[in-house]
Amino acid sequence: MLITHDTRCALDAVVDLVNTAPEDDPAQDALSDVAALADFVRRHEISDVGVLSELDLSAVRKIREKFTHVFEAPDARNAAGLINELVAAAGTTPRLTDHDGYDWHVHYFAPGASVADHLAADCGMALAFFVVAGEQERLRRCEAPDCRRAFVDLSRNRSRRYCDSRTCGNRLHVAAYRARRKEAAG
């Protein structure tokens, strides 16, 4: 599956957005205020956003919840329905652009769109490409028991199980090794 630069950027943004949601404690929300949203926008180099407000923060949190459901969708039909809602509500207006030193690529948000509509359109279309390609199962949650972070499995054989093999994957492999050693020692 060919993934263009702008699609990869949108995938990184949507995964990061979903992972800002608090697991159980609302106080752990990584998008706790407008400053945190501004930092998210800067980190992901989201263009044409303007001055952010509490309304933007509220709208981004709402689409974050919808994107969370996409990663938890049991099948492509459910994922497609959720993505269609996000993209339609954003009022997508595909247009070619070549800004900030990047070659020609497509933006799906309308000029002057809010940051929430921008994310819903561009990230929604990036996820839509996976559904169209029959690759919806690549939109995953970490299998570590104490982690439910979202990620996109871009491995060749669709075998990635953890959000980060150096943390979650390694921690579980070390625990399994220690359990085997303890059992062998009797």
Image (cartoon, helix red, strand yellow):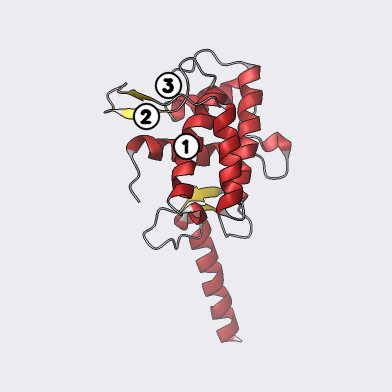
Q: At label 3, which amino acid type do we have?
A: Ser
Q: Nearer the viewer, mark 2 or mark 3?
A: 2
Asked whether disc 1 touches disc 3, contact meaning CB atoms under 8 Å apart, the reply is no
The relative height of residue 68 versus residue 154 in the rendered view (above or below) is above
Determine the secondary structure under disc 1: helix
- Residue on which disc 3 sits: 47
Determine the secondary structure under disc 2: strand
Q: At label 2, which amino acid type do we have?
A: Val
Asked whether disc 2 touches disc 1, contact meaning CB atoms under 8 Å apart, the reply is yes
First in sequence: mark 2 vs mark 3: 3
Q: Nearer the viewer, residue 7 or 91?
A: 91
Q: Nearer the viewer, residue 8 or 19?
A: 8
The residues tagged by marks 2 and 1 sit, at their Cα atoms, a distance apart of 10 Å
| Image x and y of residue 8, in percent | 39, 40
Crowding near the residue tagged with mark 2, few <14, some 14–19, many ≥20 C-alpha atoms within 10 Å: some
Q: Nearer the viewer, residue 172 or 158?
A: 158
The residues tagged by marks 2 and 3 sit, at their Cα atoms, a distance apart of 13 Å
| Image x and y of residue 145, in percent | 63, 60
Residue occupying image coordinates x 50% and y 49%:
151
- Residue on which disc 1 sits: 125
The relative height of residue 115 versus residue 86 in the rendered view (above or below) is above
First in sequence: mark 2 vs mark 1: 2
Determine the secondary structure under disc 3: loop
